[in-house]
Amino acid sequence: DIQMTQSPSSLSASVGDRVTMTCRASQSIRRYLNWYQQKPGKAPELLIYAGYSLESGVPSRFSGSGSGTDFTLTISSLRPEDFATYYCQQSYSTPRTFGQGTKLEIK
Amino acid sequence: QVQLQESGPGLVKASQTLSLTCSVSGGSISSGGYYWSWIRQHPGKGLEWIGYIFYSGSTNYNPSLKSRVTISVDTSKNQFSLKLSSVTAADTAVYYCAIDRYNASSGHAYFNSWGQGTLVTVSS
């Protein structure tokens, strides 16, 4: 199985901040990497697919980058509704695997 | 936009079989390019992929659960189902059905639609 490791596990930031979180794969997954946002009590929602493609309807303040084993999700200017947990997920192979999540909290 | 809705018992006794159904609306389960998937999330934890089924009936399961999992599809009802046998307390989780949308030309796949999730508790 491909292991996905996210860092940090939690992050405190303020509205308006620029935030970056990372995801590392245990082997190269090229650009087969997706990012999701999950709010408490809700299902995850797709933000970014194929490494950097923005899902329809997702604000442009979200962006993804990286390839191979190292990936980043950046939020350019935090809004109150962005405080949530973010997961990366590889679709290079099965079993599909997710990172353990980065919880973004209000400072 | 295709919508998904899980249904099934919220309480299952240990050693019995967990059974859930995902009803698909706004689209046909026979559409190509979709893998109809199950994912679970233990309380306060991360996400675990259980497996998926293609409308033709071909399946792919997580090896960690493969011996206990069956995913099936009923195209006439536009539904797909999950059965997990011999459950224990470790199977207590929120279970999501989701669409793993697959782009054959690029090879990329991503979960672009999710059900709301249903909590299944395994009791002793």
Image (cartoon, helix red, strand yellow):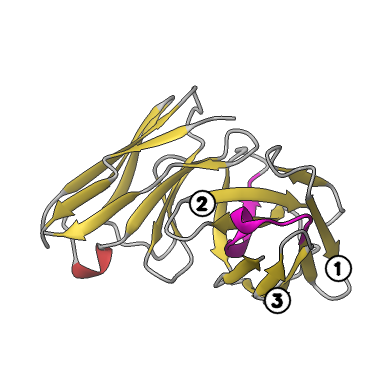
- The quarter of the displayed image where residue A15 is located: bottom left
| Residue located beneath label 1 in the image | B75
> Is residue B93 covered in magenta?
yes
From the top left corner, tell me how far across and down residue A83 is, in percent: 25, 63
Mark nearer the N terminus (2 vs 3)? 3
The segment highlighted magenta reads B83-103
Q: Point out the image quarter for the N terminus of chain A.
A: top right
Do the residues marked 1 and 3 share a common chain? yes
On screen, residue A38 above or below A62: below
- Badge 1, how many Cα within 10 Å: few under 14, some, many 20+? some
Element marked by disc 1: loop
Sequence-wise, the earlier of marks 1 and 2 is 2
Helix, strand or loop under label 2: strand
In this picture, residue A29 sits left or right of residue B62: left
Q: Which residue is mark 3?
A: B9
Q: Chain of mark 1?
A: B
Q: Chain of mark 3?
A: B
